[in-house]
Amino acid sequence: MTEVTAAPATAPVSPAATARVLAEAARAVDAPDLVLAVSRNGVRTVHTGGSAEPGPVPRELTAYELGSASKPYAGLLLARLVAQGRVRYEDRAADLLAPGLPVHPAVRRITLRHLLTHTSGLPGLPADFYPQAVPRWSTDPYGGYPADRVVRSFLRARPRHRPGTRWRYSNFAVSVLGHTLAAATGTPWEVLLHQQVLAPLGLDATRVRPGPDGTDAVGHRRDGTPVPALDTGGFTAAGAVRATPPDLLTFLEAHTGGAADSPTDSSLAAALTEVTRPVLRRGWRHAHTHTLTWFHHPSPYGPVLFHAGATLGQQAFLGFRPGTGLAVAATATRRVHRADTFVATAYGLLTETP
């Protein structure tokens, strides 16, 4: 099924042409539920499909688990708090979480910027995470590791590398960032995210916990077996966001610079600009560029910013081209596997179309 919603702006490619592109792309992805959504200057085209029977809520209005694609929300939150003068990127996390507590010198040097940009020196997950997670790896690896344990693990950490010297993707670090911002503002993470990001952008169908029965997508293993809803435990900031495709497009449209309803709040506008600015390079010969929170790649049509995510049984992809009004959001309800085409398909929609 393809649904086209028109907006006053003129799109560079017709909605009908975009609908054909999405329908063709969808054939490459095998999933019980699939949504491919594109916005061009506010003109939205949404394709839905999949091998499963549709549920009581249309696929395009169902909330999907974003997994690591939650991190851009954490990044925008930090950038807005910085724009408001409530924290600084160079604030040290340990000083905000546990003032005066003795910690390893490398931990003492870790800043909010280090945590968000994966340059803190922390591992992907705490070392003591795995013993409790492995026995339930395919059902609930995170639920038994609460927030206070994440914080304690950070304060006891012994980073392998000096902060700011190496890039290493870390759910641990971004989770610590969430707890640090909550401590610095005296506001629970969920409330802080709603106040600073979700409500100002009108993201009424975005949340960090499961919604009412029937409103959340059900994930599946590769063999089609359903899996339970994700419980992120103490790793909320790194992967707990759930959102509907329309809300995903609204979030991305705010970043593109092409939407007609750009934020009028100065701190939010400044944050949206800040998170699109390249700040570091990594990888072989430093070929890969990153902003505070987005992967940043070149394309024939200009730079693209994107982030993908996966949970036990779902996948998500968010991407946009700054200044062009183009945004792509995609969701699927099948666990990622080696030969999976989902991310490549969504990435192609962002990088291979005018």
Image: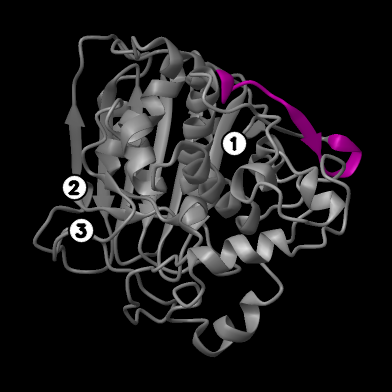
Give the label on residue 26, or none: none
* Left-right relation of 297 to 327: right
**Residue 38: in sight, yes or no?**
no
Closer to viewer: mark 2 or mark 3: 3
Q: Would you name the residue on which mark 2 appears?
A: 61
**Closest to the observer: 194 or 155?**
155
Q: Would you name the residue on which mark 3 appears?
A: 211
* Left-right relation of 131 to 137: right
Kindly identify the residue that appears in the image at 65 percent across and 31 percent down.
296
Quick one: label 3, few (<14), some, or many (20+) residues within 10 Å? Answer: some
Asked if 292 appears above or below 221 in the picture, the reply is: above
Q: Which amino acid type is marked by label 2?
A: Leu
In this rendering, the count of numbered labels is 3
The residue segment tinted magenta is 274-286
Residue 107 rendering spot, x and y as whole percentages? 78, 51
Residue 283 rendering spot, x and y as whole percentages? 83, 44
Residue 145 rendering spot, x and y as whole percentages? 51, 73
Which of the marked residues, 2 or 3, is nearer the chain's N terminus? 2
Q: Which amino acid type is marked by label 1?
A: Thr
**Residue 205: in sight, yes or no?**
yes
Asked if 105 appears above or below 82 in the picture, the reply is: below
Q: CA distance from mark 3 to mark 1?
A: 26 Å
Does 283 appear in magenta? Answer: yes
Asked if 305 appears above or below 337 in the picture, the reply is: above
Q: Which amino acid type is marked by label 3?
A: Gly
Which of the marked residues, 1 or 2, is nearer the chain's N terminus? 2
* Left-right relation of 347 to 152: left
Q: Would you name the residue on which mark 1 appears?
A: 293
Element at label 2: helix
Residue found at the very far front of the displayed protein? 100
**Closest to the observer: 168 or 114?**
114
